[in-house]
Image (spheres, rainbow, N blue to C red):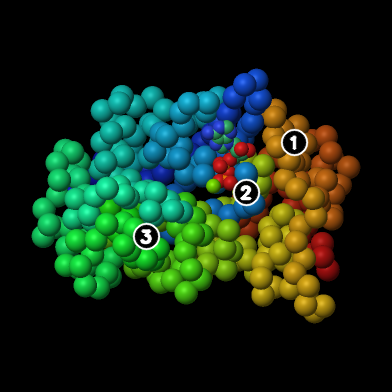
């Protein structure tokens, strides 16, 4: 597969516009994504951060048209490698998934078939098994040692880190244009987490694939991703250059997440978590979802929906920021 951009022209690789996704099960409604807008260029590395339930995985899955079952799109569009995923034919969606996307999930053992040796886990876009020589080549690309032994192993015979390397090999075998890694290191020992992130970054740079890293680990996102999207209650509340965002957060939620990061504790040595919990969003937000947890709440935050505004090359969805005050500045 070539990496030429001709079919994209000047379009970004990913273009999500005003995407709203609702889950409805037994009468309970959750707005998992609320008017999410995000574009990603070819070869770019972007991190998505936010507490559990903020919509990160839903966004990651939506890129491959994987919103199914209780979930549905109630508005907006998702365009990935020139494919409109919500209107594409099953064939076009299949071509996108098998040809251009590579997903990596938290639990590599869950990705692998427990009944097959590694040498029998790989299938081409036509559904046929891939030759052992080609598999060995991809296993080399993910920096696995002793490849003959790995090929003969069953998933349970591999360490977590090795299994994740095999899962990454499966995700990149067809040379995807976009690699979507949803908490790729959360289930791994701390000692191998950075190795896996180093590997993903190396693959992205070498192959020109864009890389999305969904993570709880803000430090990892700061060092591995050029841009970061901070999600809260189904919305992107801040989006910008990751070094800038972490150095000078605009949204009070971003500032709170950074304060809650290990190693960023105050002089009293205490790690300050964020008080309260994220809300379960059951209808379209008509206020700021963070208001009840925010130290800088204004009158309008309780009854006026926030909208993303562009300030200094950064998108921020916050009434405080709309007044030109960043969270860091408000902290004084
Ligand atoms: N299959 C599903 N059925 C019902 N609700 C779901 C489903 N998937 C996600 N949700 C809900 O959507 C919201 C966002 O979830 P998710 O995207 O998994 O967040 P994150 O990955 O940031 O933890 C949560 O409130 C979650 O409970
Ligand atoms: Mg998730």
Element type at mark 3: helix
**Lower sequence index among marks 2 and 1:** 2
Tell me where residue 22 appears, x and y as whole percent: 58, 28
Q: Would you identify the image quadrant in which residue 262 lies? A: bottom right
Identify the residue at image location x=42%, y=28%: 86
Q: Nearer the viewer, residue 274 or 123?
A: 123
Which comes before the other along the chain, label 2 or label 3? 2
Report, in whole angstroms, how far the alpha carbon at label 1 lies from the one at label 3.
41 Å
Q: Which residue is mark 3?
A: 164
- Location of the C terminus by quadrant is bottom right
Location of mark 2 (residue): 52
Task: Check mark 2 vs ligand 1: CB closer than 8 Å? yes or no.
Answer: yes
Disc 2 to disc 3, C-alpha distance:
22 Å
Other-residue count near label 1 (Cα within 10 Å), few / some / many at <14 / 14–19 / ≥20: some
**Crowding at mark 2 (Cα within 10 Å: few <14, some 14-19, many 20+):** some
Outermost residue toward the right? 299
Q: Position of residue 199 (x, y in %)?
A: 36, 67
Quick check: is the Cβ at mark 1 less than 8 Å away from ligand 1? no
Q: CA distance from mark 2 to mark 1?
A: 22 Å
Mark positioned earlier in the residue sequence (1 or 3): 3
In this rendering, the answer to whether 248 lies above or below 112 is below
Evaluate whether residue 310 shows in this view.
Answer: no
Whether label 1 touches label 3, CB < 8 Å: no
Asked if one can make out residue 88 in the rendered structure from this viewpoint, the answer is: yes
Mark 2 or 3, which is nearer the eye? 3
Residue 305's disc is 1
- Residue 171: x %, y % from top left: 31, 52
SS at mark 1 in the image: loop
- Vertical side of 91 occupied by 15: above or below: below
Number of other residues with Cα within 10 Å of mark 3, as a class: few under 14, some 14 to 19, many 20 or more: many
User: Of residues 190 and 88, which is closer to you in this image?
Assistant: 190
Residue that appears at 14% across and 41% down: 128
């Amino acid at each position: 597969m070539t990496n030429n951009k001709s079919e994209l022209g000047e379009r970004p690789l990913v273009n999500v516009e005003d995407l709203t996704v609702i889950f409805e099960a037994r009468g309970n409604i959750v707005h998992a994504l609320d008017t999410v807008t995000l574009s990603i260029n070819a070869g770019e590395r972007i991190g998505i951060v936010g507490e559990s339930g903020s919509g990160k995985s839903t966004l990651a899955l939506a890129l491959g048209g994987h919103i199914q079952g209780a979930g549905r799109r109630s508005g907006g569009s998702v365009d990935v490698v020139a494919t409109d995923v919500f209107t594409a034919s099953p064939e076009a969606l299949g071509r996108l998934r098998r040809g251009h996307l590579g997903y990596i999930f938290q639990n590599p053992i869950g990705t692998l078939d427990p009944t097959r040796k590694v040498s029998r886990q790989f299938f081409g876009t036509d559904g046929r098994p891939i030759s052992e020589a080609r598999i060995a080549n991809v296993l080399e690309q993910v920096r696995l040692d002793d490849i003959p032994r790995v090929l003969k192993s069953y998933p349970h015979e591999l360490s977590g880190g090795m299994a994740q390397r095999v899962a990454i090999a499966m995700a990149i075998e067809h040379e995807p244009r976009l690699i979507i890694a949803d908490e790729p290191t959360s289930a791994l020992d701390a000692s191998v987490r950075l190795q896996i992130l180093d590997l993903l970054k190396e693959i992205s740079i070498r192959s020109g694939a864009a890389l999305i890293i969904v993570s709880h680990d803000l430090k990892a996102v700061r060092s591995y991703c050029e841009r970061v999207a901070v999600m809260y209650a189904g919305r992107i509340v801040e989006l910008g250059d990751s070094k800038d965002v972490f150095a000078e957060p605009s949204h009070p939620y971003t500032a709170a997440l950074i304060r809650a990061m290990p190693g960023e504790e105050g002089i009293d040595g205490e790690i300050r978590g964020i008080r309260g919990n994220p809300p379960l969003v059951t209808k379209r937000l008509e206020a700021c979802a963070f208001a009840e947890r925010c130290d800088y709440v204004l009158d309008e935050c309780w009854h006026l929906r926030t909208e993303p505004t562009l300030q200094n090359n950064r998108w921020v969805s916050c009434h405080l920021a709309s007044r030109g005050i960043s969270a860091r500045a408000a902290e004084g």
